[in-house]
Image: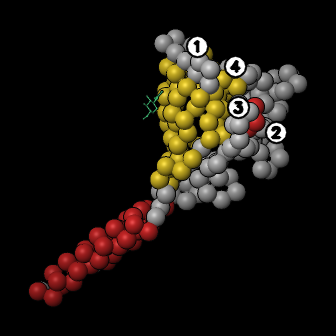
Amino acid sequence: MLRFVFLVLGVCALANAQAEKRAIVKLVGDTVHGNVTFTQEREGGPVTVEGVILGLPGGLFGFHVHDKGDITGGCLSAGPHFNPYKKSHGAPEDENRHVGDLGNIESGNDRIARIHIVDSIISLSGPNNVIGRALVVHGGQDDLGRTNHPDSKTTGNAGARAACGVIGILEEPNAATSLKYSFIWMALMAMMASLTLSE
Ligand SMILES: *[C@@H]1O[C@H](CO)[C@@H](O)[C@H](O)[C@H]1NC(C)=O
Ligand SMILES: [Cu+2]
Ligand SMILES: [Zn+2]
């Protein structure tokens, strides 16, 4: 029985070790900058977006993944919002949203924005993979597709692009991690086997 429990634990540890992915972006703008990480614990699972952005005044600011990882001509080269399903712009919780729609981030009067977003649509693999695309923070509030402004359903009328950066790989499941967990698992099995033998 105990042996079975260890077997399940071992397999779970192995599965997790193989699945966790992390990505990172350095956001650069004229007066705004910051670092943001993306963490996905299992393939297809929710992605946690965390980081700090400095230089924005107090308020809400549009925060999106844009289509291209091209910042050669500044943030404008990143193109429109990442939208593989040709939907219209919306709030993160909307059914009808761009994959890249992460809503607004809030900056304090101290010009520090601390980000903690959990999103179930963006991913670090598959068709909704954001790695290699650009993260953009805007100079204005995203109206989340809720107003009559002509840009509401495409950009959320979030204003100029204050800072951006290309989302890159930080940590990937690799052979070394899987091997490490395989060894832990094998060690556990050996221990259980020896206990069984001495009974
Ligand atoms: C971003 O990360 C770099 C390197 O770790 C660090 O020096 C810098 O202070 C960070 N910036 C912010 C805004 O957290
Ligand atoms: Cu944007
Ligand atoms: Zn959008």
Asked which quadrant contains residue 186, the reply is: bottom left
Q: Which residue is mark 3?
A: 75
Which amino acid does the dot numbered 4 rest on? Gly
Disc 4/disc 3 C-alpha distance (Å): 15 Å
Mark 1 vs 4, N-terminal side: 1
Crowding near pointer 4: few (<14 within 10 Å), some, many (20+)? many
Mark 1 or 3, which is nearer the eye?
A: 3
Give the labeled residue for mark 1. Answer: 57
* Residues under numbered marks 1 and 4 in contact, where contact means CB atoms less than 8 Å apart: no
**Is any part of residue 10 visible from this angle?**
no
Residue pictured at 52% horizontal, 11% vertical: 109
Q: Are marks 4 and 3 in contact (CB under 8 Å)?
A: no
Identify the residue at the far bottom of this view: 197
Report, in whole angstroms, how far the alpha carbon at label 4 lies from the one at label 2: 19 Å
| For residue 10, side relative to residue 195 (left or right) | right
**Amino acid marked by disc 1:** Pro
In the image, residue 145 sits, relative to residue 11, either above or below, namely above
Tell me the kind of residue under disc 3: Cys
Residue furthest out toward the front: 72
- In front of the other: label 4 or label 2? 4
Tell me where residue 27 appears, x and y as whole percent: 58, 32
Answer with mark 2 or mark 1, whichever residue precedes in sequence.
1
Q: Residues within 10 Å of mark 1 (few under 14, many from 20)?
A: some
Residue corresponding to mark 2: 88
Query: How far across and down, in percent of the image, does residue 140 sit?
Result: 69, 19
Q: Which mark is residue 140?
A: 4
Counting residues from the start of the chain, the first of labels 4 and 2 encountered is 2
Q: Earlier in the sequence, mark 1 or mark 3?
A: 1
